[in-house]
Amino acid sequence: MIALIGNRPAIQVGNHQVYDYDTVWLAHALERAAAAADRHDFPFLEEIRQGVEEYLETKCSLSLLPLQTLYERMRKMLEKIGCHLIAEQLEPLAPPVTLSLTHAARRAGNGYELAFFQCLRAELQELRGAGAEEIRFTGLRESVQMLRGKDTWDVQCDQLLNEVRSFLGNQGRDYQAVARPLRFHVEGERID
């Protein structure tokens, strides 16, 4: 059931699990912490990231690692090597999370667009609170057809498709006001 890439555990981000990930997001989190600690010149960020990556691949015995637990371990490791200021500034940043729009449409039910948008808004807030900044959406067209109750695409589907795109774009812009904006991607197209 669980396919681990490179023997890394899945990362639990809120209610979502991320299986296939690189470690660029860890590098960004460490860079931000160093900058917040006013240690722009800190030379060992790449080595620390590599150490965390090695831990994930060879030392972590868990198949599912909560993001908060990973960051607690990273803070302890930073403190052990004397980087207390960076450890204090380290904020959780999640790997990119994939969110199924068809799952949200199923929960909302056929014809319940308002419930779909409310469900999606709640999921985005939960992910944002858990440290997610990049969210990839799948099943856009399928979710629209589910919500419209249509087997074939029609003008009403086009209208709802535009509404969903607009909603996602607005949600992304709502978070532009905060220090760390959200980045959304929908099946090969970027939502700005």
Image: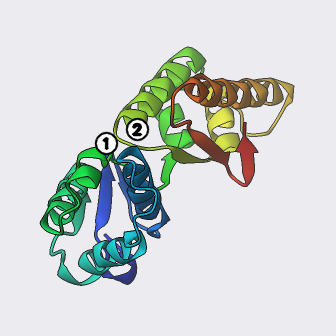
Kindly report the distance in space between the C-alpha atoms of the residues bearing marks 1 and 2. Answer: 6 Å
Residue visible at 22% across and 69% down in the picture: 63
Estimate the x, y position of residue 39 in percent, counting from the top left: 39, 55
Would you say 46 lies left or right of 87 here?
right
Is residue 1 among what the camera can see?
no
The furthest residue to the right? 155
Question: Which amino acid type is marked by label 1?
Answer: Gly
Does the residue at mark 1 contact the one at mark 2 (Cβ under 8 Å)?
yes
Q: Is residue 6 above or below residue 140?
A: below
Q: Quadrant of residue 60?
A: bottom left
**Residue receiving disc 2:** 127
1 or 2: tag closer to the N-terminus: 1
Q: Residue at x 36, y 77 (%)?
A: 47
- Residue 175 location, x and y as percent? 55, 27
In terms of depth relative to the viewer, which is nearer, 36 or 185? Answer: 36
Label 1 Cα crowd, 10 Å radius (few <14 / some 14-19 / many 20+): some
Q: Residues within 10 Å of mark 2 (few under 14, many from 20)?
A: many
Display coloring: rainbow
Between 107 and 101, the residue placed more toward the observer is 101
Q: Secondary structure at mark 1?
A: loop
Q: Which residue carries the number 1 mark?
A: 14
**Element type at mark 2:** helix
Identify the residue at horizontal 23%, vertical 62% (top origin). 64
Residue 161 horizontal/vertical position (percent):
75, 31
Q: Quadrant of the C terminus?
A: top right
Amino acid type at image mark 2: Leu
